[in-house]
Amino acid sequence: MSDEALLSIRDLQVSFAGRAGGRLTAVRGVNVSVDPGEVLGLVGESGSGKSATMMAVMGLLPGSARIEGSVRFRGDELVGRPERFLRGIRGKRIGMIFQDPMTSLDPLLSIGAQIAEAVRIHDRGIGARQAMERAIELLATVSIPSPRQRAAQYPHEFSGGMRQRVVIAMAIANDPDLLIADEPTTALDVTIQAQIMELLQRLCAERKMGLVLVTHDLGVVAGAAHNMAVMYAGRIVDYGPVNDILTSARHPYTRALLDSLPRVDRRVEHLDAIAGAPPSLFSIPGGCAFHPRCRIAMERCRIEQPPDRDFGIERVACHRAEQVGGYFSARQGTS
């Protein structure tokens, strides 16, 4: 991680009020960074802590949440800062694309009015007409045809893919340095997914904008990201360059995720599935949280939490990282 990173997250922990006065830890010691122009893929099953991590960055968690650790953006610490300071960051310097574009848009306001509002809220000196012209420009930027006519329409008149483009236009309305995209291709067909990802990559390249791509789709990450971080039970268990992890991952969870995907270069009768289910926040296992589902777990895994270890430029939290490649290669050879 670079000290000059656009976004630097160190030892981040997020917990929520639980039963009988206790606390449930949803994010456990996350360490990642994003440089200008970099696309980071944040991957994991539902409930792994991906969205909670990014909500902590944005300062959008509920009052019951307790955030510890450090989140630095352009060198400025965000954790513990007052809401007034964070409002100046959100939407202007850090943009966010939420999971469902339909719930992100007001059905009673035209598309142009909503984008213009996103512009004016951070630039009080711009007039209504200028803001609307900026909204039309942004619609053209995200490749919406006939942007002037479309600006006068309402969300229900747009398809799912077009609404997602509108949400992206709102997120980049104030030329942010960092964009957080939380499942931006969910519920879209594969053709529209490809178009949305191509758009996001183009915007990052043109604007030198950092992008955190939160997803459960390894295919999306493989085609778009430079680095990827794999989360499990609130912790980053695998972190490094996308190509390195996809070809020679050293964490058994990452390898199991990859083996569960269909591949054109390997014929099998049945896809491998990961046994069991992700742990609940109420009952995270001791030791390595993945050990109840891990095929190569040993006694040490059950009692001792693995530290982060560096293997070149890949960082892995696994006691048996050295044996993972040989074990999974042997299994594939007998499939």
Image (spheres, rainbow, N blue to C red):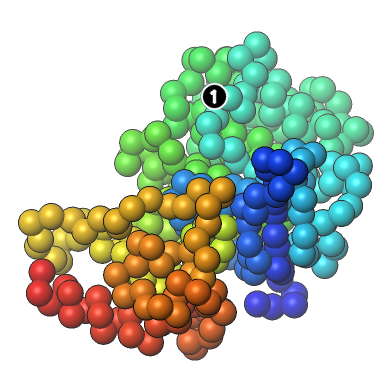
Q: Is residue 94 visible?
A: no
Q: Residues within 10 Å of mark 1 (few under 14, many from 20)?
A: some
Q: Position of residue 205 (x, y in %)?
A: 57, 60
Looking at the picture, tell me which residue is in the foreground, 304 or 58. 304
Left/right of residue 262 with respect to residue 142 in the rendered view: left
For numbered disc 1, what is the local secondary structure? helix
What residue is shown at x 44% (from left), y 75% (from top)? 301
Quarter location, residue 4: bottom right
Label 1 belongs to which residue?
102
Quarter location, residue 29: bottom right
Q: Is residue 108 visible?
A: yes
What residue is shown at x 26% (from left), y 63% (from top)? 259
What residue is shown at x 12% (from left), y 77% (from top)? 333
Looking at the picture, tell me which residue is in the foreground, 264 or 250. 250
Q: Is residue 330 positioned above or below 237 on the image?
A: below
Q: Position of residue 171 (x, y in %)?
A: 66, 40
Q: Position of residue 147 (x, y in %)?
A: 57, 26
What residue is shown at x 49% (from left), y 69% (from top)? 288
Left/right of residue 267 with respect to residue 252 in the rendered view: left
Quadrant occupied by the C terminus: bottom left
Q: Is residue 106 positioned above or below 4 on the image?
A: above
Left/right of residue 36 with respect to residue 271 in the rendered view: right
Instruction: Report the amino acid beneath label 1.
Output: Met
Looking at the picture, tell me which residue is in the foreground, 292 or 187. 292
Left/right of residue 38 with respect to residue 289 in the rendered view: right
Quarter location, residue 169: top right
Quadrant occupied by the N terminus: bottom right
Q: Is residue 132 positioned above or below 273 on the image?
A: above
Q: Residue furthest top?
A: 108
